[in-house]
Amino acid sequence: MTTSRSGILKTPRLALRELDDGNDADADFILGLLNEPSFLEFIGDRGVRNTDDARAYIRNGPLASYAAHGFGLWLVTRTSDAAPIGICGLLRRETLPDPDLGFAYRPAYWRQGYAEEAGRAVVAHGRTAFGLTRILAVTVPGNRGSIRVLEKIGFQFERLIPWPGDASEIQLHAWDSG
């Protein structure tokens, strides 16, 4: 993994970069990703219905996070063809004591090791660039694919926790540098 001076992470097969609310391709990709049935089922409905909504999501989510924390969800692209395949990055939520790893990919790119590769790079970047010694992740209990990815990266299940605004509990996973 390498880090460029603009904060882009590169792995052997992937490049991670900041999302841009002025980039039509980024807005179109986010619109499609956030409306995937799997995203709606496992992550939730973000109310993104058109490209203007997608631009607002990028502006109020990732861009605000970059400004406030220096990290956020990054666009993940394949280096072989620059195809956008998902998002991956660190989030800082008021409901959790430590930053958490978040990721989502278009189903066409599942089961190819991309989520693990990007997740490992983001965790390593969190450790080296931000001095993080503990990173969390949350999943719904039925999201077996994401749970497997977290386990491969080195996250351990800790416990079920209530999630604000939701009647169900979610799984809390943690990665510790020690």
Image: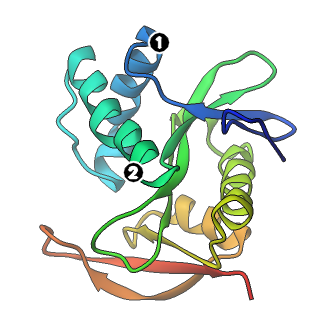
Residue 67 vs 140, above or below: the answer is above
Label 2 secondary element:
helix
Q: How is the image coloured?
A: rainbow
Residue 154 location, x and y as percent? 71, 75
Residue 105 vs 23, above or below: the answer is below
Q: Identity of the amino acid at label 2?
A: Ala
Label 1 secondary element:
helix
Q: Identity of the amino acid at label 1?
A: Ala
- Residue that carries the numbered disc 1 in the rendered image: 25
**In this view, the mark in front (1 or 2):** 2
Residue 146 location, x and y as percent? 54, 60
Horizontal side of 95 relative to 26 (left or right) equals left
Residue 159 location, x and y as percent? 42, 90
Query: In the image, what residue occupies the spot 48% across and 48% down?
Result: 72
Query: In the image, what residue occupies the spot 55% across and 46% down?
Result: 88
Q: Indicate the quadrant containing the C terminus: top left, top right, bottom left or bottom right.
A: bottom right
Query: In the image, what residue occupies the spot 48% across and 66% down?
Result: 100
Task: Give the crowd class for mark 2: few <14, some 14-19, many >=20 residues within 10 Å.
Answer: few
Residue at far right of view: 12
Using the image, tell me which numbered label, if any, was put on residue 83.
Answer: none
Horizontal side of 27 relative to 95 (left or right) equals right
Query: In the image, what residue occupies the spot 56% across and 80% down?
Result: 174
Residue 145 in sight here: yes
Residue 40 vs 175, above or below: the answer is above
Residue 72 vs 151, above or below: the answer is above
Earlier sequence position, callout 1 versus callout 2: 1
- Residue that carries the numbered disc 2 in the rendered image: 68
- The number of numbered discs placed on residues in the rendered structure image is 2
Residue 167 location, x and y as percent? 13, 74
Residue 35 in sight here: no
